Amino acid sequence: MTGKDETQTDANGLAERTFRAEPGSLYVVATPIGNLRDVTLRALDILRSVDVICAEDTRITATLLARYGVTTRPRPLHEHNEAREVERVRHELAAGRSVAIVSDAGTPAISDPGARVVRAVGRAGHRVVPIPGASAVAVAVSAAGLDAERFVFIGFLPTQAKARRALLREFADLPAALVVYEAPHRVAATLGELAHVLDPRRSVTIARELTKQFETIATLPLADASAWLAADANRGRGEFVLIVDEASARGAGAQTLAADTVRVLSALLEELPPARAARVAAKLTGIPREQLYERALELRRASDG
Ligand code: SAM
């Protein structure tokens, strides 16, 4: 842990440490993904005390800095000036200045600029200090209730259709959930593509506008995702994380039911609601009730059209 440590005492007499940026260090600072109160205390300590703040979009970062009374004016560091700016940062660190980099939202270097400057600075022997905070991938996974024990972070899929499909096929059979970032103008096409290439019975969590006013987190079978999105124009707005749960988990587990079992379940569903049909079928077959219930819901949805 670095950033010089200064102990202060708060109103309750509790010791509270504040951090000051140290000369010659690069700080990789995570910022909120929507709700400005999600900034961390240490991020503010560092932003208040560094000599230089490099930002992907200075206007966006200026809003955050103004909100917390940080007076240092951010300087642009984005993909178009990166090569030149990386050199400048290296010289500044060598001269004993401290530098922070931030992206528009979340953690730098996660589907955002940052890796190049970190690499160059680290190779030059300067200290690189991560200041952790929000990242949309972690926020979405935390609220998805995945069955999968592992997830693979894909980030943005390639824009070209052929390359997208090829990449998805590579990941299709992994025993893991898949996490994709998506923009509003492409989310409908991407959900369609996911259902086409992956098993449509896998469940998908659509996490939209996380930490913001219209935050929406919905989990449903991939097969139903396009219809869900189309049912309300607002559902297609904003920023998205899509998480497809592991193939063998939840929905896809139902596919392993024998045809006889599905017949029994279908017959019961003609007389009973899904939960009761699943309970009776579980007694008759010895198959776990949860698995039968998932399938009962699918059968009911299919028969409802
Ligand atoms: N560095 C960021 C991070 O740590 O999450 C990601 C930056 S990337 C350019 C932007 C993408 O992240 C968006 O298109 C969306 O997929 C996802 N994202 C960022 N903020 C989000 C939010 N509040 N809700 C849902 N997704 C978000």
Image: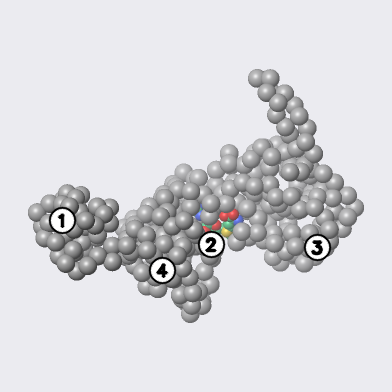
Q: Which residue is mark 2?
A: 153
* Residue at x-position 76% and y-position 29%: 7
Q: Which residue is mark 4?
A: 194
Seen as rendered, the residue at the extreme bottom is 162
- Residue 257 visible to an observer of this rendering: yes
Q: Which residue is mark 1?
A: 284
Q: Residues within 10 Å of mark 1 (few under 14, many from 20)?
A: few
Which amino acid type is shown beneath numbered disc 1?
Answer: Leu
In this view, the residue in front, 255 or 6, is 255
Which amino acid type is shown beneath numbered disc 3?
Answer: Arg
**In the image, residue 19 lies at what x, y percent?**
75, 37
The answer to whether the residues at label 3 and label 4 have Cβ atoms under 8 Å apart is: no
Instruction: Give the mark, 4 or 1, whose residue is nearer the N terminus.
Output: 4
Instruction: Please identify the quarter of the rendering in which residue 259 is found.
Output: bottom left
Instruction: Please state which of the two labelled residues, at mark 1 or mark 2, is closer to the viewer.
Output: 1
Which of the numbered marks, if any, corresponds to residue 123? Answer: 3
In this view, the residue in front, 37 or 117, is 117
Which amino acid type is shown beneath numbered disc 2?
Answer: Phe
Instruction: Check disc 2 and report its element: helix, strand or loop.
Output: strand
